[in-house]
Amino acid sequence: MNIYFSGIGGVGLGPLAEIARDAGHTVRGSDAHESLTTAELQSRGITVSNDQSGDYLAYCHVQQPIEWLVYTSALPDNHPELVKARQLGIYTAKRDELINYIIKEKNLKLIAVAGTHGKTTTTAMLVWTFRQLGIPVSFSVGSNMSFAPSGYLDPDAQYFVYECDEFDRNFLHFTPHLSLITSVDYDHPDTYPTQADYADAFTTFLGQSKQVIMWDRDTVINIVPPHGTWRLHEPDIIDFKIPGAHNRANATLIAKACEYLKIGDESRIRTAIESFPGTARRFEKLADNLYSDYGHHPVEIAATLQLARELSDHIVLVYQPHQNTRQHQVRSGYTSCMELAEEIFWLPTYQSREDLNLPILKPEELAARLTNRNVVTYADMNDMLWDHMTWARTNGKLVLCMGAGSIDAWVRSQLAATADVTPAIPS
């Protein structure tokens, strides 16, 4: 089958494009921006264009008729490539439809990793553990990894490990063999107007899963786990030798998944988990005393700062809020979540998929409820900020850059421009 991916550089479509290629399909696509993901795709022989006007799609269709156009949920309905595909009579679908097609075609058992926080790291850690145990596994992970591509279809695998997110109700299209739930906090108000809507979606998803392993604490927002769910409690957390309380909790989910699937023994599982090398943009070390993290929710911020404090007593946080629409929903959570930072540089909100009826919240409004707002400096991504970050690193402080927007790319470009350690793109 000839498949075209619109938005191929996204964390959802990029891995799927690799999986489709592994499955024997012809794959091409487009994205508005170059990224680590597009670089990884091109390194694997997948052609990526920056032309999303519809012209490149039409050109590809003339060369070899495109049978499916798979598009990211972030694309508006009037996007030029969607419009062109309809004009050309090309079948259009979101990623869940293609994933289910491949799962059925290859007779795979789906292991879904879902939850508000920690999905990417937990999915990658589970893939790493399977591979260390010698278990063939196919997978889709929403991040670049040093030890494997983001998406891969192993011809010998019986399991498909998938980072199964709730945005756009994506996870409701699947019936997993096993679901691991990392944590649950109300999120994505653009998809779920109320907390009750969010909880109902998780309840539905859990009901579609053959087996569920989750933390009992996540039932507090009225999620109703199905009968037979393995409900773990705080004393169940295994003391793995890895940084971050949240990482140790998520690693425990993986150990319990191995127990349920009857793979590996306790010693080998521990060794595998404790040797996990991490993923891109999840407390990723870019250079000495400089880390990048994708977190953009108060709960994620607090968890990542706790992890950072296990490494240093002096944390400088550079924070870029994500999406103004989301900030209207999470602003009440900006109270004690940053207390472990001794200095905070608060950047303007990165805007994406916005509700234009909502006023733009200023940094001063968002940070007003912080218990340690006296350490906040309102800043922009410029030379002045970079100079202060460099000074802090030189003086032994750990600089943590957080956000799901443009901050990571800016930091990497500054490193390259100053002839510092240039991060390698995972192959």
Image (tube, grey):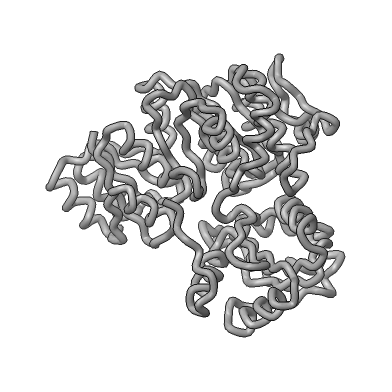
Q: Residue 251 versus residue 324: which sits nearer the camera?
A: 251
Answer left or right for 114 relative to 11. Answer: right
Residue 91 in view here: yes
Q: Residue 26 versus residue 130: which sits nearer the camera?
A: 130
Q: Residue at x 83, y 62 (%)?
A: 339
Is 410 rendered above or below residue 23? below
Q: Quadrant of residue 13?
A: top left
Q: Quadrant of the N terminus?
A: top left
Q: Position of residue 134 (x, y in %)?
A: 51, 27
Is 339 rendered above or below residue 208? below
Q: Residue at x 66, y 27 (%)?
A: 203
Answer left or right for 343 relative to 27. Answer: right
Is 138 rendered above or below residue 16? above
Q: Residue at x 37, y 37 (%)?
A: 19
Q: Position of residue 33 (x, y in %)?
A: 39, 62
Q: Residue 47 versus residue 268: which sits nearer the camera?
A: 268
Q: Residue 316 versus residue 132: which sits nearer the camera?
A: 132
Answer left or right for 343 relative to 296. Answer: right
